[in-house]
Image: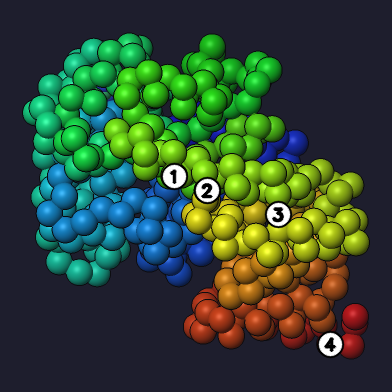
Amino acid sequence: MKPILRLITLCFFLNTTNISAQDYFGQFSKTEFNCDGEDLNFFLWLFENKTQINNFLDIKKGDKVVEIGAGNGINFGVMSMLYDSVNFTAQDINETALNRISLNKLIRKYTKYSGKPQTNTFEIVIGNLTSTHLKDNTYDEAFIINSLHDFDKQEEMIDDIGKKIKQDGKFILLEGYSFPGDTQTCPDYGPHVLHTLDFELARFEKHGWYLTKMRAPNFKAAHYGQALIYERDKNKSLAFYTKKKNVDEVISHAFRFRDNVVASDAALMLQITDSLKPRIRDINQAYTGFETWLRELGYKHMMKAEYQAAENIFKSIIDLYPTSYQTYYWLAYAQEKQSKFELALKNYSDALAKSPNNEACIKKVKQMEKLSNGKN
Ligand SMILES: C[S@@+](CC[C@H](N)C(=O)[O-])C[C@H]1O[C@@H](n2cnc3c(N)ncnc32)[C@H](O)[C@@H]1O
């Protein structure tokens, strides 16, 4: 795992026990992507399935897409499973990591995962510390994924990248963010701090880039992964901020799910859930990944063996979003951990009904049938 990715994971899930964050996030990567969690790289932490990625990124056939600081190009491996006839350009300063032979090999691997012929094209461009060496006014989407914090000359790079994006193009950042007062530094690279989201939004505005989409709320209490889309259209950004402000107050109650005392209190959780329920459509319009973000709060409790809190969170999510098999699975898992085997059997069975042939669910149902036999 890359150092900063490990940092984010470590910080978000500090003092944890039991299975790793990667196991929670990657549990259904085979079901949803036909590959292991680690093959999804940074996407693992932000999106649970192809539809979520598609809806958020909105990349179209024929688009020219570039990633700056692409490393070996792994993120285009992931994207190549989702898109057809897209022109991908992987850019980095490191010619050893990013080269034609290894990129071709990587793309072959992901083409196998996708199970369909490869129709995308892949180019490589090598830049330097202040310049991408890309063509001006060329790209529909420019990504920086888990890299901006690594750039020595960030302001110069943001300016240079801006020139390469078409007038109506998008600047997409998938990154980790910090919180005010944070003193955590990277265990591998020392003083290697992540910015707060507020700092980042203000500095992108100075470069003429305005926020038009974000995956999840600005969670100021932990390191966390976030997906942001910036565009030049100020009015579009104002419309986004109107939607966001419309729900931020009610969402702030959900931040309390993070507290074990709050989340363990079923009555209080019901009260908070009831306040969110009538606003869920508005919330989804502001934050496309709100449901996933709530599930992440559940994982966080499970990582600390706070299973009652996790159980209550997953029940809340079912109240708000009744259709996802993942929530039923994790609700059952939290119940299993508390030896509530009959309840676990019921919820694993519900997960299986919503995701037929799901191997993880089938396995758990069989286990619970044995364990629940007269025990609850
Ligand atoms: C943590 S890695 C992330 C790689 C990839 N984006 C991923 O998600 O796995 C950061 C990358 O940024 C690259 N990098 C650092 N400074 C850069 C710059 N000025 N321009 C382009 N790439 C840069 C590094 O060479 C490295 O490959």
| Relative image position of residue 130 (x, y in whole percent) | 23, 13
Looking at the rendered structure, the kind of residue marked 3 is Gly
Q: Dot 2 corresponds to which residue?
A: 243
Q: Is residue 241 above or below residue 191?
A: below
Q: Do the residues bearing badges 2 and 3 touch, measured as CB atoms within 8 Å?
A: no
| Relative image position of residue 40 (x, y in whole percent) | 40, 50
Q: Do the residues bearing badges 2 and 1 touch, measured as CB atoms within 8 Å?
A: yes
Q: CA distance from mark 3 to mark 1?
A: 31 Å
Mark count: 4
Give the mark toward the camera: 3 or 4.
3
| Identity of the residue drawn at 52% across and 48% down | 243
| Relative image position of residue 141 (x, y in whole percent) | 24, 41
Q: Do the residues bearing badges 3 and 1 touch, measured as CB atoms within 8 Å?
A: no
Looking at the rendered structure, the kind of residue marked 4 is Asn
Lower position in the chain sequence, tag 3 or tag 1: 1
Q: Residue 247: in sight, yes or no?
A: yes
Element under label 4? loop
Quarter-of-image position of residue 97 = top left
Q: Do the residues bearing badges 1 and 4 touch, measured as CB atoms within 8 Å?
A: no
Q: Dot 3 corresponds to which residue?
A: 298
Element under label 3? helix
Looking at the rendered structure, the kind of residue marked 2 is Lys
Give the mark toward the camera: 3 or 1.
1
Quarter-of-image position of residue 66 = top left
Q: Is residue 296 above or below residue 143?
A: below
| Identity of the residue drawn at 65% across and 60% down | 279
| Identity of the residue drawn at 26% across and 46% down | 76
Lower position in the chain sequence, tag 3 or tag 4: 3
Q: CA distance from mark 3 to mark 4?
A: 27 Å
Q: Do the residues bearing badges 2 and 4 touch, measured as CB atoms within 8 Å?
A: no
